[in-house]
Amino acid sequence: MLGGLDAALEWLTGNKIPLGEAISGVVDQITQGAPWLFDLISGVLGALVLGFTGALQWVHPLLMVGLVCALAWYLQRSARLTVFVGAALLLIINMGYWARPWKRCPWWSSPRSLACSLACPLALLPRTDPGWNPRCARCWI
């Protein structure tokens, strides 16, 4: 019985599906046929990132520490965590590293925000809509 399974596994791994070649061809056609689309996407995302970075740097550092501490308190209701977050951010300001994290923040927060904005409603929908099929949600998450 194992000999047949080994032969099937060998056949499966030996005969590759040309998926990479097909995807590469589609991407090449899109990039050659509509380069303006990628320029538009790049321009819009670049403007969003620069705007977000500018907004974060526009707020006074001590006010931002207060806002982040308030957010930590609101999300966790923990005095220890709130004090730790405030102390950590004040240490960052004291060491002179305040501007650096905010310049990089949009690059790591934007994908997370997009993922959460898609995943959270899909995760909560089965709880709020009794007619929702939970098996369908698995294909989206």
Image (spheres, rainbow, N blue to C red):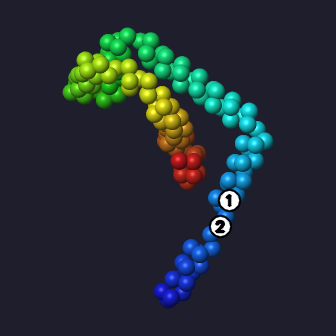
Query: What residue is at 68 percent from the left and 54 percent from the top?
Result: 23
Image marks 1 and 2: residues in contact by CB distance under 8 Å: no
Q: Is residue 33 visible?
A: yes
How far across and how far down the image is residue 94, in percent? 25, 17
Is 30 placed above or below 42 here?
Answer: below
Query: What residue is at 63 percent from the left and 31 percent from the top?
Result: 42
How far across and how far down the image is residue 102, in percent? 41, 23
> Quarter of the image holding residue 75?
top left
Residue picked out by circle 2 = 17
The secondary structure type at the circle numbered 1 is helix
Query: What residue is at 59 percent from the left and 79 percent from the top?
Result: 11
Is 122 placed above or below 12 here?
Answer: above
Check disc 2 and give the amino acid type: Ile
How far across and how far down the image is residue 89, in percent? 29, 22
Task: Classify 10 Å Cα crowding around label 2: few (below 14), some (14-19), many (20 and above).
Answer: few
Check disc 1 and give the amino acid type: Glu
Is 119 placed above or below 133 here?
Answer: above
Q: Name the foreground residue: 110 vs 97.
A: 97
Q: Name the foreground residue: 133 vs 38.
A: 38
Residue picked out by circle 1 = 21
Q: Name the foreground residue: 47 vs 73.
A: 47
Q: Left or right: where does residue 131 sit relative to residue 36?
A: left
Q: Left or right: where does residue 75 sit relative to residue 136?
A: left
The secondary structure type at the circle numbered 2 is loop
Query: What residue is at 55 percent from the left and 38 percent from the top?
Result: 118
Q: Name the foreground residue: 128 vs 24.
A: 24
